[in-house]
Image (cartoon, coloured by chain):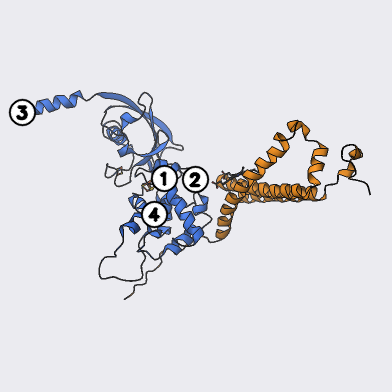
Amino acid sequence: MSVVIEQPNQPRSRKGAQWEKRAWIFMRVSGLLLIFLILGHLMVNLVLPERGVKSIDFAFVAGKWASPFWQVYDGIMLWLALIHGTNGMRTLVNDYSEREWVRKTLNVSLWVVAIALIILGTLVITTFDPCIDPDVETYLPNVCKP
Amino acid sequence: MSTTVEATKEIAAIPSFTVTLMVRRFDPENDDEPKWQDFDVTMFGTDRVLDALHKIKWEIDGSLTFRRSCAHGVCGSDAMRINGRNRLACKTLIKDLDISQPIYVEPIKGLKVEKDLVVDMEPFYKAYRDVKPFLIASDKPAAERIQSPEDRARFEDTTKCILCAACTTSCPVFWTDNQYFGPAAIVNAHRFIFDSRDEAAEVRLDILNDKEGVWRCRTTFNCTEACPRGIEVTKAIAEVKQAVLRGRR
Ligand code: HEM
Ligand code: SF4
Ligand code: FES
């Protein structure tokens, strides 16, 4: 004989449940990747160059973004760090905001800023043109010859 | 006769000390805000914070309000914030605290204070009920449900919960987000999710895969530190998270 047990309680609001799980996984995966990306970034920009941080100038950046490798590298870091950081801030907003409209407003502003920064950053990385500097020939020979 | 005298002498020999208790008081009929009140009491090395509260209630101020039943760490009624940490008053020896300073006693945080140290536990129990903390099985066996010692060991730790709420009310996420199920509800879901005799693990995992479910946990370990039964609460929550990701226990 089988007994059917009545369910006394229904789950709470199911809205967005899968998203919370995905966000949790994303924070861990992106965090792990960011460790290596950021360490590599700091090594290449600050530790390996002979004059350390002083070697970063227009030419240094132009040199890096002339290579598809660094374009992809910086692009991934940009997207991951911004989405990771913004999603982390969303957690803090959810922690502290008591009124629903405050929470909504802060979260929408966060994502607007993040999306704007991601679009601008991606544009800069992919369309960077060293030739806007008239002196570019003095430090990067032959890049702007037609 | 003489043994009684000896015994009395021995009791008198137990050193006593005077200690100040700062108790967070709130009388909903007369106060707008909770306030601190200090009491000086003479206690012995064998006394617990609960004994000091009894002494105040019985000898100094009968209006002092707090919950307690068993007085021996079994019923879970007297969780309170003692010197900033969630403890059972009946399991906290005064001599183990720094008695050169006042001992601060407050209600547990994140639940509405009803009077003095008594809070409204209903939101806590609601979260508990919501995870279906009972065996769900489709068959009706004629004898007991057999379980191997290994299968039993899987959830041994979480059977020890006495629902004192020390963990849930030590959690900073719960303090600011009262919708969060909280550690205790997850511990009690764990109790059944990992029980081989139960058939509704998926149902409970689905309930906890919620905006206010396990993903709200930020691994601060406050709950593990607070639990008077020594349950590894944070570990239990992590196991439930893993089970939600797998979709089964
Ligand atoms: C170095 C590599 C990084 C690792 C390993 C990492 C890891 C993590 C993890 C696992 C969480 C989730 C914590 C939780 O849910 O309990 C988190 C949260 C967060 N991360 Fe990162 N992260 C890294 C870099 C960054 C960067 C570059 C930013 C800023 C752009 C950032 C901003 C945040 C914020 C604001 C939170 C939310 C804090 C909170 O939940 O209390 N993280 N991080
Ligand atoms: S897990 Fe521990 S602290 Fe939490 S309610 Fe149960 S006994 Fe109390
Ligand atoms: S009074 Fe029962 S646990 Fe403390």
Give the x, y percent position of residue B138.
36, 70
Q: Nearer the viewer, residue B42 or B13?
A: B13
Q: Residue at x 48, y 55 (%)?
A: B242
- Determine the residue located farthest toward the right in the rendered image: A146
Q: Nearer the viewer, mark 2 or mark 3?
A: 2
Q: Decide: few, some or many residues near mark 3? Use Cα within 10 Å; few <14, some 14-19, many ≥20.
A: few
The chain painted blue is B
Q: Nearer the viewer, residue B99 or B224?
A: B224
| Marks 4 and 1, the one that precedes in the sequence | 1
Q: Give the residue pinned by disc 3.
A: B1
Estimate the spatial distance between the alpha carbons at disc 2 and disc 1, rounded to whole Å. Answer: 12 Å
Q: Are marks 1 and 3 in contact (CB under 8 Å)?
A: no
What tint does the image give chain A? orange
**Within-10-Å neighbours for mark 2: few <14, some 14–19, many 20+:** few
Q: Which mark is residue B219?
A: 2
Horizontal side of B196 relative to A85 (left or right) equals left
| Alpha carbons under labels 2 and 3: distance apart | 60 Å
The numbered mark 3 sits on a residue in which chain? B
Residue picked out by circle 1: B167
Q: Position of residue A5 (x, y in %)?
A: 37, 69
Residue B100 appearing in the image: yes
Disc 1, ligand 2: is the CB inside 8 Å?
A: yes
Q: Residue at x 76, y 30 (%)?
A: A51
Circle 2: element type: loop
- For the residues tagged 1 and 3, is the chain the same? yes
